[in-house]
Image (cartoon, rainbow, N blue to C red):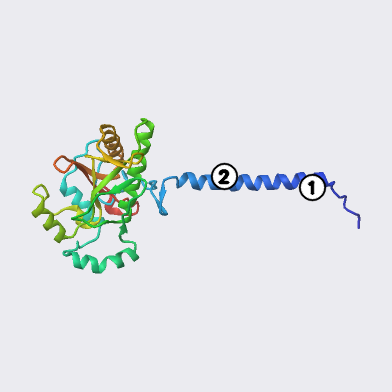
Amino acid sequence: MKNRKKLPYPTIRKATLIVIALGFAITLGVAFHIINKNSLTLKGRMITPECDHVRFPSAPISPSYKLEDRNDIHLLHAQRNGVVPPFKTDSSFNAEISGLLRKSRLVKITENRFYQLKSLSYSQPYLIPEAVDMLNEIGARFQARLKEKKQKNYKFRITSLMRTVEMQSKLCHHNRNATKSQTAHLFGTTVDISYKDFYNTDKDSIESSYEAVQALTQTLIAMRMECRFLAVRECKQSCFHITVVVCRPNAEESKP
């Protein structure tokens, strides 16, 4: 058997370094792809849309540049995708919330880098997972638009989330402007975002801002054109009333 010719040490070292470099490059490429794909993440939840909401909404909806969707359309989407039947009493909600959280049917909303919660007297800080993703994306796009326009650093403020029938009744007695008809807030699909004031993260203060209102409005219009949600600007409440649109590509009923 002939002796194999040994490669000189510098050649072996060079080949080893090339293999290591190639491996590092491949690993870096895979990592970059994952980071880029999940660039807008929060608490492990994806907020970059993977589904075409225009083509595959779970209930009928068409793109619109107007934020004036009717209550009955909000209700249609809320009832199809939210927690049904709605909770009649606060005590029944409190008795079942832990089970809904374990099953990931609802997610608790807490303040984060995108938004702040106002004092919630007539709602509970819970939404279905798709609505949480929607909120995070609104926040990310809103802040990106502010940065693009070289405006101050703001978070928007959430004024209302999920309600029980009992809470809705109390709200109607307290606030004449509250709707006495059934509301999408009962199903965990709907949120109110204030345009009256914003949280300035640099000053740690609450303030009104024309620029922030414009940035938020334009963000919502762009996402409404993508059929990401239904929205209406409520003048009396100084808020945007928003109901998530759930995307289901395999659902027959998703076709408008």
Residue 122 is marked as none
Left or right of 188, for residue 147: right
Which amino acid does the dot numbered 2 rest on? Gly
Residue in the picture at 25% in, 53% down: 189
Secondary structure, mark 2, is: helix
Q: Nearer the viewer, residue 145 or 79?
A: 145
Residue in the picture at 34% in, 62% down: 104
Q: Earlier in the sequence, mark 1 or mark 2?
A: 1
**Residue 115 visible in this rendered orientation of the protein:** yes
**Residue 256 visible in this rendered orientation of the protein:** no
Residue 11 image point, x, y percent? 80, 44
Extreme residue toward the top, this view: 149
Q: Nearer the viewer, residue 42 or 83?
A: 42
Q: For mark 1, what is the residue? A: 12
Which amino acid does the dot numbered 1 rest on? Ile
Question: How far apart are labels 1 and 2 at the CA level?
Answer: 26 Å
Residue 2 image point, x, y percent? 91, 55
Q: Please state, as top left, top right, bottom left or bottom right, where the N terminus lies in the image.
A: bottom right
* Within-10-Å neighbours for mark 1: few <14, some 14–19, many 20+: few
Residue 128 image point, x, y percent? 29, 56
* In the rendered image, the vertical position of residue 174 relative to residue 11, given as above or below: below
State which quadrant residue 86 falls in.
Answer: bottom left
Residue in the picture at 37% in, 30% down: 150
Q: For mark 2, what is the residue? A: 29
Q: Nearer the viewer, residue 235 or 203?
A: 203
* In the rendered image, the vertical position of residue 29 relative to residue 182, given as above or below: above
Extreme residue toward the right, this view: 2
Residue in the picture at 30% in, 45% down: 228
* Within-10-Å neighbours for mark 2: few <14, some 14–19, many 20+: few
Residue 102 image point, x, y percent? 34, 66
